[in-house]
Amino acid sequence: MTPTQSVFCTVFERDYHLGVGALANSLYHQGYRGVLYAGYRGPLPPWTNGISPDASGTAIYDVAEGMSIHFVRQGTDEMLANIKPQLIEQVWERFGDTIENVFYIDCDIVVKAAPKHFEEWARGGVALCEDMNSPVHTSHPLRRQWAEYYAGFGIDYVPKDDVYVNGGFVGINRRYRDFAGLWKTIQEHMKLNTGRQDRIGIADRWNMFHFMDQDALNVAKDLTEHVSIMGRDAMDFGKFGYVMSHAAGRSKPWQKNYLRNLISTGQRPGFADKLYWQHVSHPIRLFPESKAERKRMAIRTASFLSRFFTRT
């Protein structure tokens, strides 16, 4: 395999393997040659052609020449979305001095930029993306609650800015490797309030901690000197960007009926929906091409009809 400066990693279970495949395809399309390290629970994806994990729970799938997915079983009963810093530490432990960067990326994201751009980004500080719900002002009640809560652990939390970042992407260069440990510590302290983190969200946003991994990431961000934050367009939140496209929300592109959604709820296909279905065929084939083309046609039709569609 061609040497690489970086390893990308993600987590998945159930039908989210359909996101992992598209993520891998998009990375390959952008020229990435290396390892996608995928923490998983449950069965391996059906498109892996019957590979089996070894005694450690690891199975390697060759995507195409120069790129592979390392499927690594995770022995946790918590929501996999809440073990991101632990996964990043696993990657550092496994690959050590052979890499310069680790990029965690959610499996409902499609990549639109070449690896060299991510690597340049991470050299300037921990690479982060602004969330669709940003800003959260420094004087916001949540920030004040976080400061009071973490003071109980001897942590002097002072928000440095109004930016609230998304937990779907974190890029860490070797020089900032300790960030994953800080993020993990913040989340472990949080568990004394939230209990076992086996869900994506708890209570509602009035709760001091709602999206546990993401709230912890934002605390860690404010405790870190060197960060490099891109705006919401880095994930195509509201504005079409040039870095990634994130299908945030409960319903994922592979689960949607685009015409029905338009008629019943007025929901239009988004950037992430369109890009997802462009990356389901090569080099990993996730669906029969006839189904993929039907989905693309449904997106085009729903997008056209949405120009005339108004729902009150």
Image: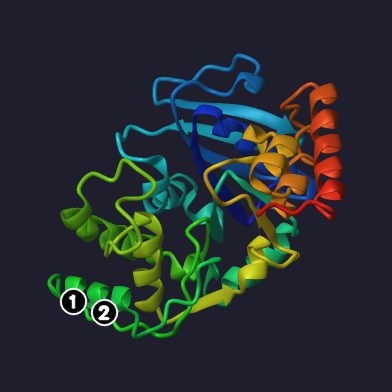
Q: What x and y, as percent, mark residue 239?
A: 71, 67
Where on the picture, by quarter, is residue 186? bottom left
- For the residues labelled 1 and 2, say whether their Cβ atoms are less than 8 Å apart: yes
- Residue 3 as seen in the image, left or right of residue 146: right
Query: Which circle marks residue 148 in the picture?
Result: 1
Q: Is residue 145 above or below residue 207?
A: below
Q: Quadrant of the N terminus?
A: top right
Residue drawn at x 81%, y 36% as measured from the top left: 298
Q: What x and y, as percent, mark residue 225?
A: 42, 82
Q: Secondary structure at mark 1?
A: helix
Q: What x and y, as percent, mark residue 97?
A: 50, 56
Residue in front for this viewpoint, 145 or 153: 145
- Residue 148 as seen in the image, left or right of residue 133: left
User: Is residue 279 visible in the rendered structure shown here?
Assistant: yes
Query: Which circle marks residue 185 in the picture?
Result: none
Please give the residue where the numbered disc 2 appears in the rendered image: 144
Name, please, the residue furthest toward the left.
Answer: 152
Q: Is residue 292 above or below residue 4?
A: above
Q: Label 1, label 2: how many angstroms apart (C-alpha)?
A: 6 Å
Residue drawn at x 45%, y 20% as measured from the top left: 54
Check disc 2 and give the amino acid type: Arg
